[in-house]
Image (tube, rainbow, N blue to C red):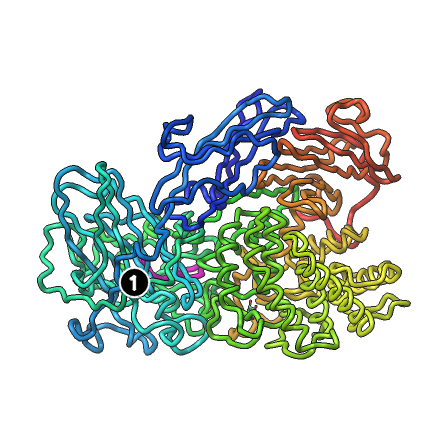
């Protein structure tokens, strides 16, 4: 799989220079509607200990004006500051629909101006009155659809689905071409915009899914290259999507959630050199016609009848006299908001790894990887009207597709051939979670090269790499990455295949730390947090899922708490204060809601669907314990957020609440003398230890009970979604990395390794999704692509390789590197492109020595804990640490040496720590 990790190569001997410029955590965003967009840059330098001592930002209307001149809009002046992250634009109010170029210039540690870099951002439509477009839709009276629409073989669930509307509007451009042309476009449904026969942009499933009742995003495209003098056409295909298609496990259509038919909106804005403007907008002048897509539904699939294609429909010269006028559904555009994250795109392709014939015209294709997206199929020599059907599944049973776990999602695409010698079919308004594809009705032999898996997900740049000496651990890391890709489709979902695909808050909060390691998810999650806040109930409860569909109860413990934990983690990882500012009132309301209904501070009332430690095995963590632990945690984080934002009274109030809930927790659930936590489960101990709920004197015994439970079970876990993310970090933090590794390397049930030994290429929803003993778990709930149990990914980066930050550090501003030598590993290495620049940490046992390496970005220091049996013998870059510039010894025990590192690359060697190999393990594959 291609991971798109890129660290721009630093020129050798290079001085301090900025790179990776972003505005609102996006590279060159088009159509931004933040009034004070925040600018960030990363730094690199080949000089050890280098740092930014000052910066200057200039913003101008033209690229050439960045050096000064009339069109310079804002000049920060030279600011003596190390800031590089999210510096707010502070010039005069930004104009609507305008491109701003910006430059950051930096001064290095010696005070010399050493480098600059340029970028740009562009504002969207900042004022409501600029929206001239109307929402338009098929007019059911002008264009009645026959029922059933065509002579088609349809299932009960798809019988009523309507064809995708094709919409078009010709217009003429005379004289000089515009200097700038933009399309602002959205749908209540899904759209594909087309101009003069070309597709516009590469966004898939646009405009995405938000809490539509409150906001619908619009995308902005530069369409200048597609326009021409004379006749032009702007056109679109419109599908149901989340707006009115099947969503979730609700057997009703989502029509009941949002609307009953899709609508479209576009506004072309053409700017001319003389300052004049022209608009071409969606309105009553557009015409509509059904085309070849008989229906498209996210869960059911897409049906394309190529015989009904409309050649040339999206280009000038097409005769649309038989098309129907559209219905103008309203001009109310109050909820339109510029898309604040990168769209879903096709980001990888997978070739078929095998094709097996199963009958006269039926084949089963394996893509070798459980993926999310759809198939592109080339069809050769089909007769006109020949129907080819694609069914999708994650697993096989007796060599045939296992589809029972998809529940009501049909995940079936149909192509009716036009009869051309070569035809290419790829559905556009649906997606499936699958590894296997059954192709029925295919003419002749199916060549593996004619079927490709097209991988779709939100474009979140890949920023992490992890590798180690153990192939199974590497496969685990890869499976976690695939779970992340497959479930970041419009919102962070639980699963991509069955009739669910919802934004479950607990799944998201437990996985977020891992997600942030793998990829830059700052904009994706900040945008989704707005939906979380939008969906908050009037009484203060967050829901279980956002956007809120199918479930309307108050969020359960650990689920609703996602509304508090997520913004806090985004702040810690990316330094995004604004997401905290915008979320804090809602975070407070959530904690108040829990408090109001649980004045005794043990959370037993208003627990919603109370899922407990969901999908735990062989254990039953008391639900009130889990709930109360989360109550304490949320109160603590609200206090921390308030402190960051300078809301001191809130900080005090929630700090006091946190202390009180902690006390109530101990009172209700802890035998302090024995260090026992009620229920005696792994998750109970993990929550108590991770959230700091135990009196200090109870900690050693509690760790002992946790360890004893793992040992008594032959080094097996019992944790569900909630406990699992804490397992390895808590063990390692309390001196039991041997057990953390024992669990990591375990390959008998239940363990991560068990699924991998049985061929998993993604993380399964359940430890027992499939077992040798019982086969498949109940099809009522058994996804093979769920990221929650993959939350151990964070520990691979943060524990095994050792990249972490100090408790008070923000955005990796003060690194804490703590590699964990142990398990069956002989080496491990991680690399992260953080928002301040490249960080690496890795270790290798070789020739009886421990070799460590680390990279620290300019302006940052790192504390590196070197685990070693001989702290006096640690060397840096070949010399004793004490003699090496930029390395300072700050701590020492008899088993470790702690050094403080300046920025730059560091290599250290040490005597290996004593035997750290985990108990009860057989060596794994190399
Ligand atoms: C199922 C899924 C989901 C989980 C909920 C409680 O629908 O496993 O991931 O959050 O249950």
- 759 displayed left or right of 859: left
- 50 displayed left or right of 898: left
x and y percent of residue 242 in the render?
Answer: 38, 66
Tell me the SS state at disc 1: loop
Q: Residue 853 appears in which quarter of the rendering?
A: top right
Q: Residue at x 23, y 64 (%)?
A: 165
Q: Residue at x 21, y 47 (%)?
A: 278
Q: Is residue 516 above or below residue 239?
A: above
Q: Is residue 724 above or below residue 624?
A: above
Q: Residue at x 66, y 25 (%)?
A: 48
The residue wearing badge 1 is 361
Q: Is residue 748 above or below residue 613?
A: above
- Of residue 346 and residue 435, the one placed in the foreground of this image is 346
x and y percent of residue 697 in the render?
Answer: 89, 60
Q: Which residues are magenta?
A: 426-438
Q: Residue at x 57, y 22 (%)?
A: 15
Q: Quadrant of the C terminus?
A: top right
């Amino acid at each position: 799989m291609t991971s798109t990790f890129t660290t721009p190569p630093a020129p050798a001997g290079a001085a301090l220079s900025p790179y990776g410029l972003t505005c609102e955590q996006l590279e060159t965003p088009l159509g931004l509607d933040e009034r004070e967009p925040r600018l960030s840059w990363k730094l690199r330098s080949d000089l050890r200990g280098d740092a930014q001592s000052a910066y200057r930002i200039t913003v101008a209307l033209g690229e050439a004006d960045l050096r000064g001149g009339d069109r310079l809009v804002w000049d920060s002046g030279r600011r003596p500051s190390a800031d590089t992250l999210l510096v707010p634009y502070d010039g005069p109010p930004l104009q609507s629909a305008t491109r701003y170029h910006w430059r950051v210039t930096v001064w290095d540690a010696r005070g010399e101006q050493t480098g600059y870099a340029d970028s740009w951002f562009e504002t969207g439509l900042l004022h409501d009155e600029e929206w001239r477009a109307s929402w338009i839709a098929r007019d059911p009276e002008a264009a009645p659809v026959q029922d059933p629409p065509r002579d088609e073989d349809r299932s009960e669930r798809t019988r009523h689905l309507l064809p995708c509307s094709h919409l078009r509007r010709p217009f003429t451009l005379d004289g000089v071409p515009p200097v700038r042309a933009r399309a602002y476009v959205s749908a209540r449904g899904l759209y594909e915009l087309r101009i003069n026969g070309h597709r516009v942009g590469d966004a898939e499933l646009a405009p995405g899914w938000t809490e539509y009742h409150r906001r619908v995003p619009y995308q902005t495209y530069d369409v200048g290259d597609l326009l021409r003098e004379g006749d032009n056409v702007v056109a679109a295909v419109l599908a149901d999507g989340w707006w009115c298609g099947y969503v979730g496990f609700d057997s009703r259509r989502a029509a009941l959630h949002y609307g009953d038919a899709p609508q479209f909106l576009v506004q072309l804005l053409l700017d001319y050199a003389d300052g004049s403007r022209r608009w071409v907008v969606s309105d009553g002048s557009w015409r509509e016609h059904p085309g070849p897509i008989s229906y498209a539904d996210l869960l059911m699939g897409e049906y394309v009848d190529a015989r009904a294609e409309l050649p040339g429909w999206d280009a000038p010269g097409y005769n649309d006299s038989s098309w129907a006028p559209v219905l103008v559904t309203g001009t109310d555009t109050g909820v339109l908001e510029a898309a604040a994250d990168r769209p879903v795109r096709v980001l990888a392709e997978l070739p078929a790894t095998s094709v097996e014939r199963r009958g006269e015209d039926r084949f089963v294709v394996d893509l070798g990887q459980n993926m999310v997206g759809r198939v592109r199929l080339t069809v050769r020599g089909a007769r006109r009207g020949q129907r080819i059907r694609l069914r999708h599944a994650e697993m096989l049973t007796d060599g045939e597709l296992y589809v029972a776990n998809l529940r009501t999602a049909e995940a079936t695409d149909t192509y009716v051939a036009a009869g051309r010698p070569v035809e290419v079919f790829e559905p556009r308004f649906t997606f499936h979670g699958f590894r296997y594809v059954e192709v029925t009705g295919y003419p002749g032999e199916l060549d593996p090269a004619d079927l490709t898996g097209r991988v779709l997900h939100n474009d979140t740049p890949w920023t992490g790499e992890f590798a180690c000496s153990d192939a199974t651990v590497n496969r685990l890391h890869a499976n976690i990455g695939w779970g992340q890709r497959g479930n970041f489709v419009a919102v962070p979902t639980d699963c991509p295949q069955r009739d669910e695909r919802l934004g479950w808050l607990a799944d998201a909060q437990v996985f977020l730390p891992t997600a942030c390691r793998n990829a830059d998810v700052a904009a994706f999650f900040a945008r989704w947090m707005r939906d979380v806040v939008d969906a908050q109930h009037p009484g203060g409860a967050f829901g279980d899922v956002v956007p809120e569909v199918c479930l309307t109860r108050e969020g359960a413990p650990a689920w609703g708490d996602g509304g508090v934990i997520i913004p806090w983690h985004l702040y810690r990882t990316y330094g995004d204060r604004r997401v905290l500012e915008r979320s804090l009132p809602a975070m407070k309301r959530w904690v108040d809601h829990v408090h109001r209904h649980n004045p005794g501070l043990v959370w037993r009332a208003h627990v919603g669907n109370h899922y407990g430690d969901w999908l735990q095995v062989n254990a039953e963590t008391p639900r009130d314990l889990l709930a109360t632990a989360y109550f304490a945690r949320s109160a603590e984080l609200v206090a921390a957020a308030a402190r960051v934002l300078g809301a001191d009274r809130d900080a005090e109030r929630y700090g006091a609440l946190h202390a009180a809930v902690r006390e109530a927790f101990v009172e209700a659930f802890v035998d302090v003398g024995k260090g026992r936590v009620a229920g005696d489960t792994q998750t109970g101990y993990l929550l108590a230890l991770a959230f700091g709920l135990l009196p200090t004197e109870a900690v050693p015994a509690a760790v002992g009970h946790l360890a004893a439970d793992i040992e008594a079970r032959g080094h097996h876990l019992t944790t569900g979604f909630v406990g699992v993310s804490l397992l390895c970090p808590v063990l390692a933090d309390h001196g039991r990395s041997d057990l953390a590794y024992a669990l990591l390397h375990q390959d008998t049930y239940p363990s991560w390794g068990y699924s991998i030994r049985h061929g998993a290429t993604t993380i399964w929803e359940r430890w027992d999704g499939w077992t040798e003993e019982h086969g498949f778990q109940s099809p009522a709930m058994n996804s093979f692509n769920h990221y929650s149990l993959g939350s151990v990914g964070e520990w691979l980066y943060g524990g095994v390789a050792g990249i972490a930050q100090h408790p008070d550090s923000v955005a990796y501003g003060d690194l804490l590197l703590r590699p964990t030598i142990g398990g069956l590993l002989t080496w491990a290495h991680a690399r992260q492109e953080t928002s301040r620049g490249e960080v690496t940490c890795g270790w290798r046992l070789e020739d009886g020595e421990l070799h460590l390496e680390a990279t620290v970005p300019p302006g940052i220091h790192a504390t590196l804990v070197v685990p070693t049996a001989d702290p006096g013998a640690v060397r840096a870059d070949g010399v004793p640490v004490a003699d090496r510039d930029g390395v300072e010894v700050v701590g020492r025990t008899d088993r470790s040496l702690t050094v403080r590192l300046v920025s730059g690359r560091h290599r250290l060697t040490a005597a290996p720590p004593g035997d750290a190999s985990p108990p009860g393990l057989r060596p794994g594959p190399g």
